[in-house]
Every structure is written in structure tokens, then in C-alpha cells.
Amino acid sequence: MPPYDCMLLFKPHVKKEALIGLVARIGKHICRRNGVVTEVKSFGTIQLGYGVKKLDGRFFQGQLMQVSMMATPEINKELHYLNKEDKLLRWLLVKQRDTKFGLEFMGDEGRLEPSRFSQINKPDDDDDEDEDDEEYEVNEDENRVN
């Protein structure tokens, strides 16, 4: 099952209980279709770049939430009931492409090798720390004006 992100933009005046209720309904729908909700994030109230026109007015703010999930590819068609939700301004389903998990992320050349992690870049011990200080010393007697 490929991973998806569902971005939900709610109207700004919708109460928190209603937001949680709709997200729970989406989660139950996904679970009934043998999917898994992996994460739910709330980004709070955001300013929109332009007004979104709905039957009850034009909205320049919204409450943004992200629902991450792993579901079957048919989930896009199954979530079209969200179009009829009066609490939502917009919703978007994004499929994550080329997502690798676990050791697949490291690849063949990046296997966990203890020798790679034990090499700590230490600065070289330079004994010539203050050699250049002589160049920058200013003789105060020469700069005085009588």
C-alpha cells in the first residue's frame, strides 16, 4: 500500500470537536478499507493567499490539518464524499512517491558500518595559534597626534 497525505482545510470558525470528528470519520473509513492512519498533524489557523468562496461567504483564513496514511490506490475515489462536507473549504490527497523506509533508505552503499560512525572529525592541533598576532599589533605611540 502506498503512503498518502490528505490535507484538509477547514473553515476558520469550525470547533475543535467537529474537526476531530471528521478526521476520526476519515480514519474509520480508511481502516474499513484495510488502510492505516500513520499520523495526524494540525497546523492551526493559517492565512490564505486568496479568498475561498463558499455559499456562506468568502474565507481568507482556514484551519489546516494533515492526515498521513497508507491505503489502497482506490482511496482517492472513496474520499470524494468530502466534497459535500460543509465544514471543509478544500481537501487534497497527495501520493508520496519513491518513499523508502528503514534500511532501504540507506541503500547498498550506505549500510550500517561501525567504522563510518566512529570517525569523528577532530580539528587538527595547530601549535601556531598566535603567530599572526604580531602583524596586527598597533603601536599606539605612532597613532597619537599632539
Image: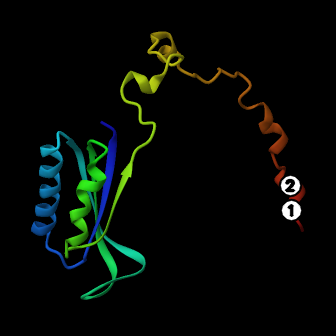
- Residue 8 appears left or right of 108: left
Between 38 and 140, the one nearer to me in the picture = 38
Q: Could you say where residue 76 lies in the image, as x and y percent from the top left?
A: 30, 53
- Residue 7 appears left or right of 124: left
Q: Could you say where residue 72 lies in the image, as x and y percent from the top left?
A: 27, 41
Q: Could you say where residue 141 lies in the image, as x and y percent from the top left?
A: 86, 55
Amino acid tagged 2: Asp
Local secondary structure at mark 2: helix
Circle 1 sits on which residue? 144
Q: Residue at x 40, y 76 (%)?
A: 48
- Residue 41 appears left or right of 144: left
Between 93 and 47, the one nearer to me in the picture = 93
Between 131 and 62, the one nearer to me in the picture = 62
Q: Residue at x 28, y 55 (%)?
A: 77
Circle 2 sits on which residue? 141
Residue 25 higher or lower than 110, as above or below: below
Amino acid tagged 1: Arg
Q: Check disc 1: other Cα within 10 Å, few if <14, some if 14-19, many if 20+.
A: few
Residue 125 found in image quarter: top right
Q: Residue at x 15, y 63 (%)?
A: 22
Which label is found at residue 16?
none
Residue 136 higher or lower than 79, as above or below: above
Image quadrant occupied by the N terminus: top left
- Residue 126 appears left or right of 24: right
Local secondary structure at mark 1: loop
